[in-house]
Amino acid sequence: MLRLASASITRAELLNAAGISYLQESVDFDEDSIVAPTPKNFVYQATLGKYKVNLEKFGCSDYPLLVADTVVTAHGKILRKAKDEDDARQILQMQSGSDVAIITCMIYKTPRLELIDISSTHYFFNVFDPESIDQYIQSGDWRGKAGACMVEGFCKPYIREVRGFESTAMGLCVEVLKPFL
């Protein structure tokens, strides 16, 4: 059993699918204060910030602590969570027909081990159909998603090529985590 310090439903689903027992509770961390020169540095700083506040609150002696954060990047820009429908549309248009990297950082802490991993998965997308973008935006499924991206949903039919683990793109690299449990 571990403590998943994340409110992400997708991360919880990944742990369920991998047969990993967990307790899900988290202390929020304000990512807006982060200034980072690269997407990889940003996701590391965000994860480290979440790790510090959750370690302080929960420790890791009762349950190992697992913290993660994910960023989507295209054309060298970090594509954060969309603020509104117009922002979601602009973010999706940047990804359409492009190489998109989804970078996930996780920290797993037990009393004897601290694992820090930064993994990335690259998606090469075909051009998104404008009508499908409209339907996706109207659905609201993009809300709360880094880069308004759902590789397991909206983006799936547009994937031309993938390099990396799908779990990384979904927010937690289970393939790296499992050997340490």
Image: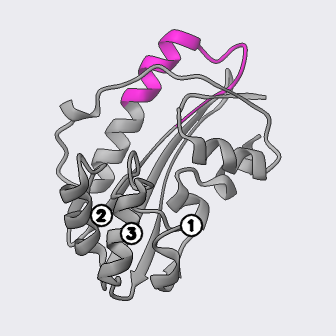
Q: Position of residue 37 (x, y in %)?
A: 17, 51
Q: Position of residue 147 (x, y in %)?
A: 33, 58
The outermost residue toward the top is 57
Mark 2 touches mark 1? (CB < 8 Å): no
**SS of the residue under disc 1:** loop
Pick the quarter of the image with the C terminus. Answer: top right
**Which contiguous range is marked in magenta?**
49-67
Badge 2 local density, few (<14 within 10 Å), some, or many (20+)? many
**Any mark on residue 133, and which?**
none
Residue ID for mark 3: 135
In this rendering, is residue 138 above or below 177?
below
How many numbered dots are placed on residues in this image? 3
Q: Position of residue 148 (x, y in %)?
A: 36, 58
Q: Nearer the viewer, mark 1 or mark 3?
A: 3
Q: Nearer the viewer, mark 2 or mark 1?
A: 1
In this rendering, is residue 60 above or below 169?
above
Pick the quarter of the image with the N terminus. Answer: top right
Residue ID for mark 1: 152
Q: Residue at x 18, y 58 (%)?
A: 86
Three-letter amino acid code of the residue under disc 1: Glu
Three-letter amino acid code of the residue under disc 3: Gln
**SS of the residue under disc 3:** helix
| First in sequence: mark 3 vs mark 2 | 2
Q: Residue at x 46, y 52 (%)?
A: 104
Q: Nearer the viewer, residue 3 or 111?
A: 3
Give the color scheme: rainbow, by chain, secondary structure or one colour: one colour
Q: Residue at x 52, y 51 (%)?
A: 171
**Any mark on residue 73, and which?**
2
